[in-house]
Amino acid sequence: MKELEEDPGVEATEGVLVRDLRASDAAAIVKIDRASTGRVREEYYRAKVKAALAEPSLRTSLVAEIDGHVAGFLLAKVFYGEFGHAEPIAVIDSVGVDPQRRGKHVGQALLRQLVMNLNALHVERIETQVDWDQFDLLAFLAKNGFRPAPRVCLQCTLDAGARG
């Protein structure tokens, strides 16, 4: 993740303030998600924000501001030994940038700050899942060192035929 090793406040990310998530950010997160996806997931994000704030010692959920307005968010969590891993890993659950702020390095600033916070926690790996057709997000993550994991994500629709 070479690009992530720089300080978050230099060059391209100048003017983007990254800070810890606050309860009052939920409405802005819902608005950004709605503008990006076309879906209203207010209860989902209120629950995610509440859960993230329940672990205040782990600063892994972040908000980016430009000119005092929320421009993006990144919700992540650290797992210690779950999912068959012996070492701690971080998982990015949700990331979003206001469509009007894209191209202003908001995502870059969020990811850099997350990496600095994770380094302080001695976490050496980040994982996430992305829909195969989220081309912009896939390109952003690839640019920042993310590669396909050597795992397969499986799902099963619970209908009458799938129940054992």
Image (cartoon, grey):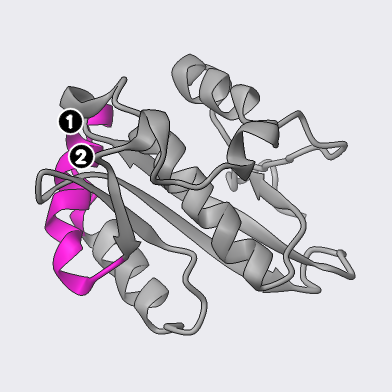
Q: Is residue 7 above or below residue 122?
A: above
Relative to 46, 117 lies left or right: right
Q: Residue at x 67, y 43 (%)?
A: 156
What separation in Å lies between label 1 and label 2 (alpha carbons)? 5 Å
Picture disc at residue 18: none
Foreground pick, 153 / 106? 106
Q: Which residues are magenta?
A: 21-42
Q: Residues within 10 Å of mark 1 (few under 14, many from 20)?
A: some
Q: Residue at x 58, y 44 (%)?
A: 159
Foreground pick, 30 / 20? 20
Q: Residue furthest front?
A: 10
Foreground pick, 143 / 51? 143
According to the image, label 1 marks what residue?
Answer: 35
Q: Residue at x 49, y 65 (%)?
A: 60
Where does the N terminus fall, quadrant-wise? top right
Q: What amino acid type should be assigned to the residue bearing mark 2?
A: Ile
Tag 1 near tag 2, CB within 8 Å: yes
Prevailing SS of the magenta stretch: helix
Q: Is residue 13 above or below residue 30?
A: above
Q: Is residue 27 above or below residue 53?
A: above
Picture disc at residue 32: 2
Q: Position of residue 155 (x, y in %)?
A: 67, 42
Q: Position of residue 103 (x, y in %)?
A: 31, 20
Relative to 100, 10 lies left or right: right
Residue 42 sits in which quadrant? Answer: bottom left
Relative to 64, 30 lies left or right: left
Relative to 56, 90 lies left or right: right
Q: Position of residue 72 (x, y in %)?
A: 28, 43
